[in-house]
Image (cartoon, grey):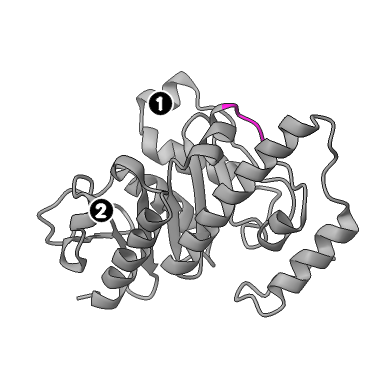
Amino acid sequence: MYEQLKESICNATLKLQTHNMAAYNSATLSAIDRSAGIVAIKPATIPIEELRPEKIVIADMTGNLSQNILKPSPQLQTHLEIYKHFDAVNSICNTYSHYATMWTQSCNEIPCFGSQAAEYFYGFIPVTESLAKTEIQDDYQANIGKAIVKRFEKLNPDQMPAVLAASIGPYTWGKTAAKAVEIAIALESVAKTAFGTVMLNERQKPISLEMLQEHYNQANTANPWEASVS
């Protein structure tokens, strides 16, 4: 069952590898079938080059597995927390891509300096609060998801399809697995150019609101999120 969902995860995960976004098998991708109440996610121990649709793990929304031999990625509980609160999100990707992870480990938001970033992200790419000791020791993976959800209390996850989990790594999402991966690739590119911009001019100001709106609206007029910017 759920062959199409499984195949979409396999194909999108291989694209991550093609773009050097999944070094040492470190990327995780999931997708949800909300009507069925199930989540499909990459298994924990299978190298990406050996990934096949039949090896994708199926779980319900409480994390219970459905006739799986392989263990799911430990990120399952994090993804479930995001799915429970972001109703329009159908796929989630987390990686440890180099530049996005550097921003994450420095606990700094990624500024929106130019049109490239504005086409995907409406403003600064946010970073979560660091987890407390008790949050790390108890339900660690679920608490990562809760920290992400908390960071978006005043943000629109449709207009900002990415977040930096402090000291952990970047997360992106979309309507499909392919879109979540596309945004992950875009995030890494934006993180790299933002890093270079800061190196050249540490006082560089973010893109103007007018230019941000112009480029975001141009790129997202036919976007499935149908986001409007006032």
- As measured in the structure, the alpha-carbon distance from the residue carrying label 1 to the one carrying label 2 is 28 Å
Q: Which residue is mark 1?
A: 136
Quadrant for residue 51, please give it: bottom left
The mark closer to the camera, 1 or 2, is 2
Question: Was residue 109 drawn as part of the magenta stretch in this picture?
Answer: yes
Label 2 CA crowd tier, 10 Å (few <14, some 14–19, many 20+): many
| Disc 2 residue type (three-letter) | Ile
Of residues 79 and 150, the one nearer the viewer is 79
Mark 2: secondary structure: helix
Asked whether residue 211 is drawn in magenta, I would say: no
Is 113 rendered above or below residue 223? above
Residue 24 to residue 59: above or below:
above
Residue extent of the magenta highlight = 106-110
Q: Which residue is the site of mark 2? A: 48
The residue at the point 82 percent across, 63 percent down is 213
Q: What secondary structure is found at the residue carrying circle 1?
A: helix
Instruction: Using the image as rendered, state which of residue 2 and residue 209 is in the foreground.
Output: 209
Which residue is found at the position 45% from the left and 70% from the top?
176
